[in-house]
Amino acid sequence: MEVGLPAGPRRRVPGLRREEVAQLAGASVDYYIELERGRGPQPSTQMLAALARALRLGSDERDHLFRLADRPAPTAHGTAAHVPPAMLALLDRLDTTPALILTDLHETLVQNRLAAALLGPPVHAEGHAASLVYRWFTDPGSRSLYPEEDHPHHSRVLVSDLRAAVARRGHDPRSMDMVARLRRASVEFVALWDTGDVAVRRGERKRILHRELGVVDINCQNLFSEDGRQRLQFFTAPAGSPAVEQLRLLAALGPRKLADDQATVR
């Protein structure tokens, strides 16, 4: 399917089923049905943004959805940021490899089912806590996805990438507030930030700890939007490596089971 769902039996009518929209938006079917009926709690900004992505709405359509919910259209930043349809279309076609779209502050916007199986479900958090960079230095549990001996490397890479993002944003208040809070919260962050190192994180080899698969040694690459504010990140197995079979098992064992298992250790 065009939205990244597995193919199923022929449909009598075109379009997505309710349960498919709910799945793509990360909501329960019952909650989505209540939204359709105009009942239940007012949807959050994050939920409206997730529904817009699930339905592959353009920017004007997304803004109209927010107005219908009596909410202002969100800014171009944060977890409610609009994802260009072309980038979503590319994500949809990466259905055999883990892939996700995130902001330049490492806030996950949308991910495919294999990314959820490999990395666990996205963290639903408000404010700076939605950023992996922020959680990396303020929540020790956020590092459990990677071997401990790799943590110093990831710390350096995340900080140098953040510096590049802050400069690209023109030192806007949101990114500068994140830096200020991190400086107060983490001695490690201060030491790395004060080096002045800057480098955009384009691609590297990563080792990921997975409860079912063990250590997955995998390539991580990034494709950037025109303004650099968003990136499509995808994972591939080096040819002839154990990760080839591990990714095959990731798909065969079932993303939902693996994602649930992974979530217990995040």
Image (cartoon, helix red, strand yellow):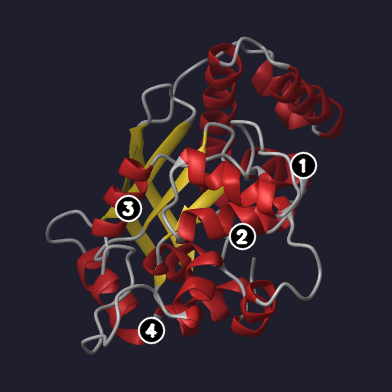
Query: Which tag, 1 or 3, sits closer to the chain's start?
Result: 3
Looking at numbered disc 3 in the image, what kind of residue is underneath it? Leu
For the residues bearing labels 4 and 1, Cβ distance under 8 angstroms = no
- Residue wearing tag 1: 127
Q: Which residue is mark 3?
A: 91
The type of residue carrying mark 1 is Gly
Furthest toward the right, the residue is 184
Q: In the image, what residue type sits under mark 4? A: Gly
Q: Hey, which quadrant is residue 87 in on the image?
A: top left
**Residue 221 appears in the figure:** no
Marks 4 and 1 sit apart, C-alpha to C-alpha, by 32 Å
Q: Earlier in the sequence, mark 1 or mark 2?
A: 1
Depth check: give the residue in front, 44 or 110: 44
The answer to which of marks 4 and 3 sits earlier in the sequence is 3
**Whole-number angstrom distance, CA of label 1 to CA of label 3:** 25 Å
Q: Residue furthest left?
A: 240
Looking at the rendered image, the quarter that the N terminus falls into is: bottom left
Give how far across and how far down residue 198 sits, in percent.
51, 15
In the image, residue 90 sits, relative to residue 92, either above or below, namely above
Q: Quadrant of the C terminus?
A: bottom right
Of labels 2 and 4, earlier in sequence is 2
Q: Which residue is mark 2?
A: 144
Q: Nearer the viewer, mark 4 or mark 1?
A: 1
Residue at image coords 65%, 22%: 192
Residue located 53% across and 31% down the image = 104
- Residue closest to the eye, 36 or 134: 36
Q: Please tell me which residue is depicted at 37% across the width and 68% down the height of the picture.
A: 114
Residue occupied by mark 4? 254
Q: CA distance from mark 3 to mark 2?
A: 26 Å
In the picture, the disc for residue 11 is: none
**Label 4 CA crowd tier, 10 Å (few <14, some 14–19, many 20+):** few
Residue at 41% across, 37% down: 231
